[in-house]
Image: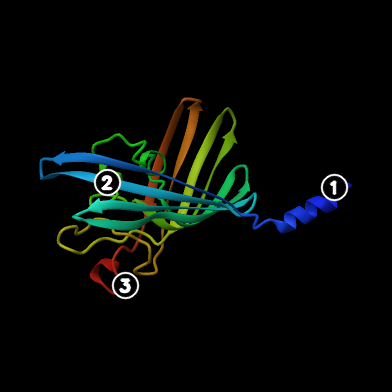
Amino acid sequence: DEFKPVKATVADLRLGTTKMVISGYGATGYAQHEDAPSSFEAHFSPIFLFKLSDKLSFEGELEIVTEDNDTALTLEYANLIYHVNEWLTVQAGKFKSPFGQFNPRYDALWINKFADAPLIDDDGADGIVPHQETGVMLSGIHDAGPTKVKYNLFLSNGIRVRTDAAGFGLPDVNDTDNNSNKGIGGRVGIFPMHELELGGSFEYSGNIGDAGSAQSH
């Protein structure tokens, strides 16, 4: 009790209470494909983590990569995270799609050892589902008798497709909504044993085209 006034005075003198960590990773590599020129590549991804309180935090990642004789800067993800309780977390912003396991777990270059990303999750023009989603997501893990159930459920701007000749019909970035018709999706997994997870993913958007276009119905 005697030290409480002193601790309060010291706390008032601190520059701030937000905890911040700057991390990230970088890589360089060489790729050779049958249908494209061979090339050396460089990649740098700084990651920013802020702990605003015991329940509220923020995470964001920038992606800087050499591409087509130029340096491209993109926002990989940026979202606020609120930990409601031990089995529910709410995220809002731009996050990696939980469709499958690759995006949230293995996409980082220091983890991913594939020569090419899986077709369904390719971070570019050749993926089947969006690599990122912009919206809100509920996630967590819950005891279910002798097993556990892990879930990710999201509401996002929905799937939008490219209309250019090179990528016609492929998913486009959905940072903004093109028709006000939101999409839903997620993943549910169960753990029949500690080392094994069985799961399934889904995503649905009833309207994928620009508002007023033929693809909007």
Residue flagged by tag 1: what amino acid is it?
Phe
Residue flagged by tag 3: what amino acid is it?
Ala
Q: Please tell me which residue lies in front, 44 or 96.
A: 44
Q: How far apart are marks 3 and 2 (CA)?
A: 38 Å
Give the residue pinned by disc 3.
211
Residue found at the far bottom of this picture: 212
Give the residue pinned by disc 1.
3
Task: Say if residue 117 shows up in the picture.
Answer: no
Q: Which residue is drawn at 47% across and 25% down?
A: 195
Q: How far apart are marks 2 and 1 (CA)?
A: 53 Å
Q: How crowded is mark 1: few (under 14 residues within 10 Å), some or many (20 or more)?
A: few
Q: Please tell me which residue lies in front, 54 or 217.
A: 54
Residue flagged by tag 2: what amino acid is it?
Ala
- What x and y, as percent, mark residue 54? 65, 49
Q: Are marks 3 and 1 in contact (CB under 8 Å)?
A: no
Q: Please tell me which residue lies in front, 166 or 45.
A: 45
- At mark 2, the secondary structure is strand
Left or right? Give the position of 46 relative to 8.
Answer: left
Give the residue pinned by disc 2.
42
- What x and y, as percent, mark residue 214? 24, 70
Q: Identify the mark nearer the N-term, 3 or 2.
A: 2
Q: Distance between the residues labelled 3 and 1?
A: 64 Å
- What x and y, as percent, mark residue 7? 79, 50
Q: Which residue is drawn at 41% across and 46% down?
A: 98
User: Any mark on residue 175, and which?
Assistant: none
- At mark 1, the secondary structure is loop
Q: Are marks 3 and 2 in contact (CB under 8 Å)?
A: no
- What x and y, as percent, mark residue 21? 52, 48
Q: Residues within 10 Å of mark 2 (few under 14, many from 20)?
A: some
Residue found at the far right of this picture: 2
Q: Identify the mark nearer the N-term, 3 or 1.
A: 1
Mark whose residue sits in front, 3 or 2: 2
